[in-house]
Amino acid sequence: MTNASVVIVNYNSGRFLEVCVDSVCRSDCSLEIIVVDNASTDGSADFLSNLTASDVSLQVIRNEENSGFSAAINRGVGDSKSENILLLNPDCLVFPHTIRLLSEALDADASAGIVGGLVFNFDGSEQRGCRRREPTLVRSLGKVFQRHTFAAELNQVDMTDEPLPEKRICVDAVSGSFLMIRRTTFADVGGMDEDFFLHFEDLDLCRRVRDVGWKVVFVPDISIFHYRGGSSEQSGHRVSWEKHRSMRRYQRKHHGRNPWLRGLVFFMVWGHFVLQRTRWMFTHGSKTLEERQWSPAEWAGLSCMTVSIGSEKGNRLLVLGVIDEPVRDMIHFGTTIGWSIYACNEVEDAQRTENVHWLHPEYFDKVPARDVPEINALMIAPSFSCRGVVDRMVEKFRVRRIAIIQLVASPDRSNEDDAAKLFEVKIIQEMLAGDLMKGKVSDRETRVFSLPSSKPAREGHAVGVHWDKAIQDCFSWLSK
């Protein structure tokens, strides 16, 4: 007997589906996977016909038309055999232990009908929706207009900005992208409401589960990554329409007994839809199919991180601070010799670097201990000087080596102001290095590497040789 059934609804998910299924097949428990394809036209499900994996039973259901998410879920669950059923979006990545632990969490609480875990966006921030309160009309209006000051206090649907609980708690709803439900519970509520074509079906399911006496439980120490929108970015207008339609249906179904209230909901929902579409027309267009289907720095980096927990394969470097030109050159060298590079920077519009996966600082605070990636080394950019952050990183990620990159002024020093700034930064970095070395433990080492500050200086023969040697020495030391 399998530990759980995994139901995945696919609609033009591109390469997302393949990587998602691959991560599920690496699970450390026996599973059955049921992929319900809603008449995809991009060939995203074609690879499934040749898929073979031990301890995994695979079934593919191909609908002749797009019957909607809820209807596809009902069909997939109807063909499943396990008592515990995981509803998983095709743009999710799970760890090998994720599904087993979630199933154990459900089995451990006889009063729980649904359990969900911590869902991270690809930038490492907690995804809105993975722990939620009931979306009453007032809360929903606050969420719709959350960018406006007057509605800031009203948006209490998402609990993302609240401290992450230390243990599992009861919530009103969890994310339908990663939701495990008992077969008994699913039958008690009659499955998904198929009038919800897309969006709000998970909120409706959690509401009806609570209404018949089951608990909805959020488990903070089980996590996944979710891209959010892997199936829908190419059809933004249709998705937005269905989302607003489902929003209105949810309010009418659960909070719309008063006719005046129903009228207010109607005008607010569709008024927001018109405003959203108008703003969209003047601000941006859709991503191309190629951009949506595959983002190597994001998918490859996260896929490697989720499947390599507990292994010693590959070297991973975490860069702290702004990646300027000298550090970017070092990263380029590191990737050419096989290092996987991750970066943490609070500046949202910081210039991105190819082959680097950027993670939000929130990720390093919230990631469960068992899902912590194995970071071999830290590289501290010249702009970074926060000792407390370094200590937390070292402790949580078991980092053994720390390379502090220090910029030195060019020999000609044509700009005295720049030289003065570099000298000031150098003093700060030397203080940081001194603090780290004084407080080091037996299995951690810290070393400073000096690099020329300007590109012309590095292009000079003598300085260029020093530059190349500094990079090689740095990665040679980090690799030990």
Image (tube, grey):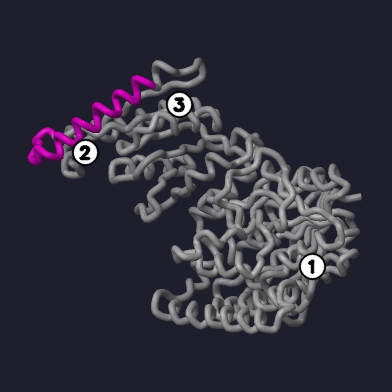
Label 2 or label 1, whichever comes before in sequence order: 1
Our reading of the magenta stretch's main secondary structure is helix
Vertical order, 311 against 293 (above or below): above
Label 3 or label 2, whichever comes before in sequence order: 3
Is 20 part of what is drawn in magenta? Answer: no
The quadrant holding residue 42 is bottom right
Residue 350, labelled with which disc? none
Q: Element type at marker 2?
A: loop
The residue identified by callout 1 is 60
Q: For the residues labelled 1 and 3, say whether their Cβ atoms are less than 8 Å apart.
A: no
Amino acid type at mark 1: Val
Vertical order, 328 against 401 (above or below): below
Amino acid type at mark 3: Arg
The residue identified by callout 3 is 401
Amino acid type at mark 2: Ser
The residue identified by callout 2 is 453
- Mark 2 vs mark 1, CA separation in Å: 57 Å
Write down the region rendered in magenta.
411-435
Across and down, in percent, residue 428 comes to 28, 28
Q: Which residue is located at x 51 percent, y 54 percent?
A: 298
